[in-house]
Image (cartoon, rainbow, N blue to C red):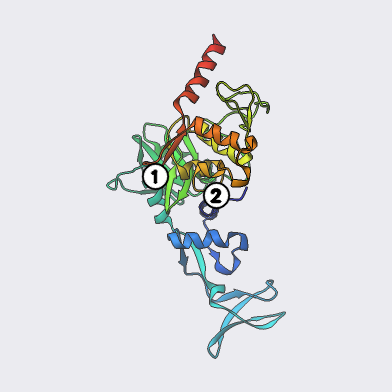
Amino acid sequence: MNLSRNAAAWELVCQRWQSGHHWFDDAIPPVQRTAHEHLVELKAVKPVAVNQQFALCGHCGLHTAPIFRDKAALRMQCPECGPVAVAARDLKAWVVDEEWLIRKLRAAFSVPTHQEVVRITAGVWRIGLHQRTAVLLARRLDLLLQQPSVLARGRGETVLWLITPKRLREGDDDPVAGAARWLPMEERFTLYGGNVSFIDADTSRGDEAIASADPVYGPFSADFRWVRLQGEGASIELSEAQAAVLKALWEFGGQSQEAHLVMSRAGLASDKPIDVFKVKAQHKGNERYEGPLRAYKALVKTNQRAGTYALAPGVMGAAISSAVATLS
């Protein structure tokens, strides 16, 4: 599934923020160019001055040599290729704008402007309070694992919120062992319209469920690829994208969410949930396509004025009643 431009841009922010290093314009991979340009438009990244005395050879890419001016042009003397022109973009470097990121994360948590940002140590900031609890932002999780005292200094008397990108290598689900409520940037925040939003709900289902058409989560099968409507004996098969949308709505626990949050959780580039359920003219009357749309209309509650989406109250209620009946 291709990432939307916003999702790809946010993924790039998390990667670059974690490294803490600048990157050169000419070294941006083609697959990241669109995301990078979007970040430039949002002013999420900014140009930075770097050492312009040396440059990497643009021909062989193997040797670095001093830059010298030849008439009106800049060149470097590669030991293999000889004099090589150095373009201005070869010297242009970027970094994630620290102030932009902190400002957007504070807005996502509705931190009042009068609360100050405090730099606790290199790469770690206390950016305010959320639900009367301190919020820490760290460039890397390793910075805190190597310095446990930093958590104590930022915490106060309560278990704080901790925002960091995920570690490059796999690790424990709770790497800080309960000392903080960890919020991985890639999973718990999303970028849309120049703003960063916090995904509050976290009711993900377990991976142990067995895939079948039988209802497991309310009317949905374990993999959300099937849904059984009340009064209908047969389950309706959904496409991968349709299942991702309904799974996202389920994980939000019945709470109304804006379209971009739903689609970001689903990992889709479409603007609205209904987009993946629309029936094309050539498929009108075909139950394979009409069934998912009927399920969407029956199960999803839309507030068009607010632009929000949620599973209908009866969907979550039926699931809870079923669970209670099973336990009794």
- Using the rendered image of the protein, determine whether residue 231 is visible from the camera's viewpoint: yes
Q: Which residue is mark 2?
A: 269
Q: Where is residue 192 drawn, in percent x and y?
A: 45, 50
Q: To which residue does mark 1 refer?
A: 108
Residue extending furthest toward the left: 114
Which residue is at 54% across, 16% downward?
322
Between residues 3 and 238, which one lies in front from this camera angle?
238
Q: Residues within 10 Å of mark 2 (few under 14, many from 20)?
A: some
Q: Residue furthest right?
A: 80
Q: Residue at image x 50%, y 52%? A: 6
Q: Quadrant of the C terminus?
A: top right
Q: In this rendering, would 224 be left or right of 297?
A: right
Which residue is at the front of the view, 100 or 282? Answer: 282
Q: From the viewer's perspective, tell me whether residue 209 is left or right of residue 175.
A: right
Q: Residue furthest bottom?
A: 71
- Label located before the other in sequence (2 or 1): 1
The amino acid marked with disc number 1 is Ala
Is residue 174 visible in the rendered image? The answer is no
List x then y, in percent, for residue 98: 43, 56
Is residue 145 rendered to the left or right of residue 121? right
Residue 268 image point, x, y percent: 56, 46
Say which of 6 and 276 sits in front: 276
Q: Tell me the amino acid under the disc marked 2.
A: Ala
